[in-house]
Image: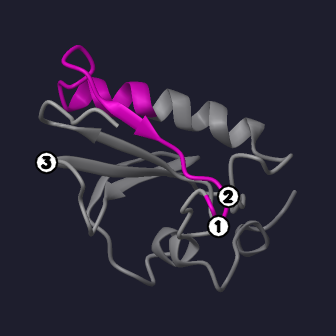
Amino acid sequence: MLEEDEMLDQDCLFCKIIQKKIPAELVFEDDQTLVFKDIYPKASIHLLVIPKKHVSGVTDPHSLVEINAIWSTINKVTEKLAIKDKGFRLVINSGHDGRQEVNHLHFHILAGERLKVL
């Protein structure tokens, strides 16, 4: 089994948040995922959901387990924040042209207001 440090990228911003080396406003945490507020929100509720294991993105061939954990966390968090029935938007940016700013798999949850049409 891999040690925790072997599952993280020491140069990754989100891995540093996982290790508590960089502060973040946490909303939810379990063994596999972490949810925190985006520092540049695009809606009144803008959260990032990340796996605690470093996976570069949604197209990483090793991302399936992490994506399943993220789906579970999204259900828990949207229920906890009472936005599950009102509605929310999920955004996944992939790669440079897709505007993925941090090379660590993450989902954006946008909610709390009627969102604009894309």
Q: Label 1, on which residue? A: 96
Q: CA distance from mark 3 to mark 1?
A: 26 Å
Precedes in sequence: disc 1 or disc 2: 2
Residue at x 71%, y 61% (from the top left corner): 56
Quadrant (top left, top right, bottom left, bottom right) of the C terminus: top left
Q: Residue furthest top?
A: 85
Q: Which residues are magenta?
A: 74-97
Q: Mark 2 and mark 1 in contact (Cβ < 8 Å)?
A: no
Q: Is residue 48 left or right of residue 93?
A: left
Question: Marks 1 and 2: which is nearer the front?
Answer: 1
Picture layout, residue 6 above or below residue 41: below
Instruction: Tell me residue 91's x, y (percent).
Output: 46, 42
Instruction: Identify which residue is drawn at 23% across, 59% down.
Output: 41
Q: Earlier in the sequence, mark 3 or mark 2?
A: 3
Q: Under tag 2, what secondary structure?
A: loop
Q: Which residue is mark 2?
A: 53
Looking at numbered disc 3 in the image, what kind of residue is underneath it? Ser
Q: Residue at x 64, y 68 (%)?
A: 103
> Where is residue 9 drawn, in percent x and y?
70, 76
Residue tagged by mark 3? Answer: 44
Q: Can you tell which of label 3 and label 2 is closer to the viewer?
A: 3
How far is disc 3 from disc 2 in space, using C-alphas?
28 Å
Q: Is residue 99 left or right of residue 54?
A: left
Badge 3 element: loop
Residues at badges 3 and 1 in contact (C-beta under 8 Å)? no
- In the displayed structure, 35 sits above or below 38; it is above
